[in-house]
Amino acid sequence: MTQLVRLDILSDPICPWCYIGKTHLDRALAEAAAPVFEIQWHPFQLNPDMPPEGMDRRAYLEAKFGGKERAVEVYGQIAEAAEDAGLMLNLGAIERTPNTLDAHRLIHWSGLEGKQGEIVAALFRAYFEEGRDIGDREVLADIADGVGMDAAVVLKLLASDTDIDDIRARDAKGREMGVTGVPCFIVGGQHAVPGAQPPDLWAKVIEEIRANTPAPAA
């Protein structure tokens, strides 16, 4: 068996390209004959200065893209790319753009329980397909419960300052490394693969890894 290669993914659960990029990666991994990566998700807030309560999504998008027309154009392209990836985003159901600091804390805690991939997937579905406010702590606790985490413990942690400084420091570290947008995939701690790359690119990466990675010693 080939030794697993670390794949660090910088992402934000309200980033549509991150959801699309994850879907492309998942497809390539599903077609691989055996596991290739040991995946670790890392925080990168698209809007680190977002108010804790978030803001109206329409107002946010129009401010970000310079008006309604441009926002509609950009998200039309995103919806098309998502559909090509096999995703059916329900963008009209999203009422608020949340602050994702708490969502990133949940992703971190889920990793301690070996459930990080499940939580990341659940957050993407909740936000982009179900229109849920993933800045709401009750919503986050319910999502945690859905993957087998203890919702009461999660709520207690969210009510505290636990790991807030750590998440912010890790976010800052990504920016210091030169990451300006997500998703960003770092293969083996060396090679950065930016953006929502298609499955065939990941298939080539996997093929190269298998050709160059020795099997673990018996």
Image: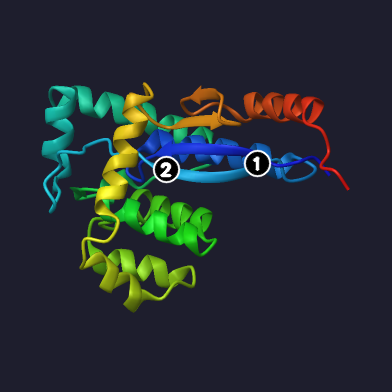
* Residue drawn at (62%, 30%) of the image: 199
- Which badge, 1 or 2, comes first in the chain's sequence? 1
Tell me the amino acid under the disc marked 1.
Answer: Phe
Q: Secondary structure at mark 2?
A: strand
The x and y percentages for residue 175 are 32, 27
The x and y percentages for residue 107 are 40, 55
Res 28 → quadrant: top right
> Does residue 131 appear in the picture of this structure?
no
* Residue drawn at (17%, 43%) of the image: 57
10 Å crowding of disc 2: few (<14), some (14-19), many (20+) = many
Res 178 → quadrant: top left
* Residue drawn at (52%, 45%) of the image: 40
State the mark number for residue 42: 2
Residue corresponding to mark 1: 37
10 Å crowding of disc 1: few (<14), some (14-19), many (20+) = some
The x and y percentages for residue 37 are 65, 41
Tell me the amino acid under the disc marked 2.
Answer: His
Pick whichever, 69 or 190, lies toward us. 190
Q: Is residue 130 toward the left or the right of residue 51 in the image?
A: right
Q: Is residue 26 toward the left or the right of residue 209 in the image?
A: left
Residue 132 lies, with reference to residue 57, above or below; the image says below
